[in-house]
Amino acid sequence: MTPTVTPHCCGSFRVDERLLVGNRSGVVEAPSITYLIEAEETILVDTGFGSVELMDRRHPGYGCHREPGQDLESILDDEGYTPADVDAVVLSHLDWDHCYNLGPFDECETDIYVQREELAYAVAPYPLHADRYEAKSLGREPPWLTVDLTALGGETELAPGITAFPTPGHTVGHQSVAVEEDGGTTVVAVDAVQTFENVPDDGDPVPGLPMDDLAWWESANEVLDRADRLLPGHEWGILDAEPAGLV
């Protein structure tokens, strides 16, 4: 079976555009995206942010919003799946807007993957990054803390034609996923390349505000080298959805 990748919108939020593309200014509405990979195994990349009510308490400035049908279980149901049908979840990284909604997999035999470096850092991040990781130092419990995670040590084939590979920079242990579809390689870049505006046709890649600029640069170029089709992390252009009008 040739793998296919379908991105789905699982909500949206307001964000300072500099966090996405560093040479911009203002506030934009960014989508939260989960990517369904259908192959010999069924794999999700990322699971979005948590309930809007909880996000309003923990991250009030972002104005998180979710339209009907944009919750993870509805997305799976629309594609003909239940959580039990999902063989694996790949968490690109452990920022709060990418790693909630793991509860439906509690009673399932679903593997949940994260890079070892990301997990080690997220457990006790530098104080500047504590909020984005919902660190225990803030008196919070991040959504992945009680989950049985499988830590990957570098590039790993998850199933035939599906490979997770490290793309650090946005965070310490960010990872992306390469999928061998008909016609070439699709790279689910997530926040290694957050929008198409990070990779203009007429110039060098433009970062947002990564943790490590040099690592981001190297990862972005690796993604571009591998990708025949690029799927960024917060790009409306890859979705069959429109902004909700938060901005």
Image: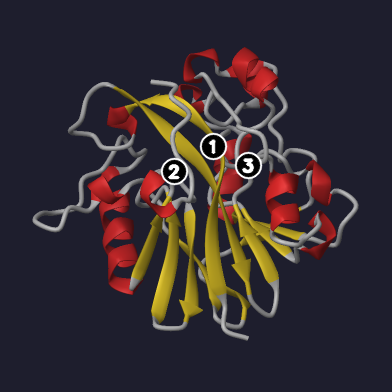
Q: Which amino acid does label 2 sit on?
A: Thr
| Left/right of residue 41 with respect to residue 210 in the rendered view | right
Of labels 2 and 1, earlier in sequence is: 1
Does residue 181 sit above or below 37 in this rendering? below
**Of labels 2 and 3, the one closer to you:** 3
Q: Which residue lies furthest to the right in this view?
A: 107
Disc 3 crowd, CA 10 A, few/some/many (<14, 14-19, 20+): many
Q: Position of residue 76 (x, y in %)?
A: 72, 54
Q: How far apart are marks 2 and 1 (CA)?
A: 8 Å
Q: Position of residue 12 (x, y in %)?
A: 51, 32
Labelled pair 3, 1 in contact (Cβ < 8 Å): yes
- What label does residue 99 carry, if any? 3
Mark 1 secondary-structure assignment: loop
- What label does residue 95 carry, if any? 1
Labelled pair 2, 1 in contact (Cβ < 8 Å): yes
Q: Mark 2 points at which residue?
A: 171
**Quarter location, residue 100:** top right
